[in-house]
């Protein structure tokens, strides 16, 4: 429940889904978001009632934990191999490229703003995230332009074809190692007490990215690739 007495920082902390809407109004929910909503609306000449209604609507949207993973995997399993591959490109590849761009920008921002108190850990997180992003961008390109087109051909895969796909599995493991490092360095994406909402937003977006990558790799390693290996 959002009240007029709450600050924008409070709203965002509880309901990150409201951020794009606040950005539209160019409202500072970050380091300067400490005034009550009623006061901000007055200062910025915003019609309070519809503004509150829209915030409530966005806050009520299902959180990512409410996603039906079971149903999603059932849907994915029912596809043919070429359909699975096209589906992965359309969903996870697109979403993760967006999330990586978002996290990269947020990380650069908080690295500067919080350098004084959190410079050491943020530098390391920034560095390892950059490695993960570079690895995944090259991996997606390889899948889309080289390996998936091979896998989309019908018939029994040759040993050379299979070697290409096994190479992808090795790259997944390497990405998994970097993710484990990031989980450790961010204490599983728990922002320190003394930081601003941008810092929290950065960590929650990184967490969303990692969740998406795990589901993505699971679908490839455990469903699509085994299905391909068994193709006659
Ligand atoms: Fe992929
Ligand atoms: Fe992959």
Image (cartoon, rainbow, N blue to C red):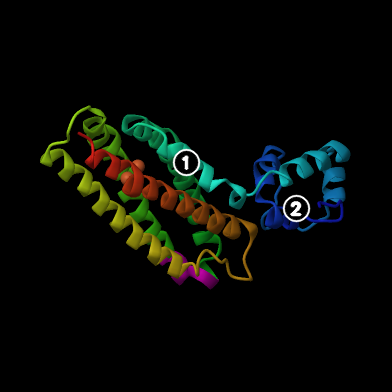
Q: Label 2: how many residues lie within 10 Å, few (<14), some (14-19) or many (20+)? A: many
Q: Residue at x 25, y 47 (%)?
A: 168
- Residue 65 to residue 113: above or below: above
- Residue 215 to residue 90: above or below: below
Q: Is residue 8 left or right of residue 105?
A: right
Could you say whether the residue bearing mark 1 is in a helix, strand or loop? helix
Please name which of the two marks, 2 or 1, marks the residue nearer to the observer.
1
Q: Quadrant of residue 97?
A: top left
Q: Is residue 119 magenta?
A: yes
Region in magenta:
117-124
Q: Is residue 196 visible?
A: yes
Q: Earlier in the sequence, mark 2 or mark 1?
A: 2
Quadrant of the rendered image holding ligand 2: top left
Q: Which mark is residue 74?
A: 1
Q: Quadrant of residue 232?
A: top left
Q: Is residue 134 left or right of residue 63?
A: left
Could you say whether the residue bearing mark 2 is in a helix, strand or loop? helix
Q: Is residue 16 left or right of residue 176?
A: right
Name the one closer to the observer, 123 or 221. 221
Q: Residue furthest top?
A: 154
Tell me which secondary structure the magenta stretch mostly adopts: helix
Which residue is under mark 2?
8
């Amino acid at each position: 429940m959002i009240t007029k007495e709450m600050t924008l920082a409070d709203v965002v902390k509880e309901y990150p889904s409201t951020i794009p809407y606040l950005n539209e109004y160019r409202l500072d929910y970050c380091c300067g978001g400490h005034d009550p909503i009623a006061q901000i609306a007055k200062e910025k000449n915003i019609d309070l009632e519809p503004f509150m209604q829209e915030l409530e609507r966005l806050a009520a949207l299902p959180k990512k934990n409410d996603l039906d993973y079971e149903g999603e995997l059932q849907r994915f399993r029912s596809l043919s191999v070429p359909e699975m591959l096209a589906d992965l490109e359309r969903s996870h590849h697109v979403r993760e490229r967006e999330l990586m761009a978002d996290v990269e920008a947020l990380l650069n921002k908080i690295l500067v703003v919080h350098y004084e108190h959190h410079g050491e850990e943020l530098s390391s997180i920034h560095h390892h995230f950059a490695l993960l992003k570079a690895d995944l961008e090259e991996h997606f390109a390889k899948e889309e332009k080289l390996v998936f087109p091979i896998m989309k051909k019908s018939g029994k895969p040759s040993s050379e074809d299979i070697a290409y796909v096994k190479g992808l599995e090795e790259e997944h493991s390497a990405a998994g190692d970097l993710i484990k490092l990031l989980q450790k360095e961010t204490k599983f994406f728990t922002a320190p007490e003394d930081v601003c909402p941008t810092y929290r937003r950065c960590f929650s977006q990184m967490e969303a990215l990692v969740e998406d990558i795990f589901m993505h790799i699971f679908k490839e390693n455990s469903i699509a690739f085994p299905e391909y290996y068994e193709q006659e």
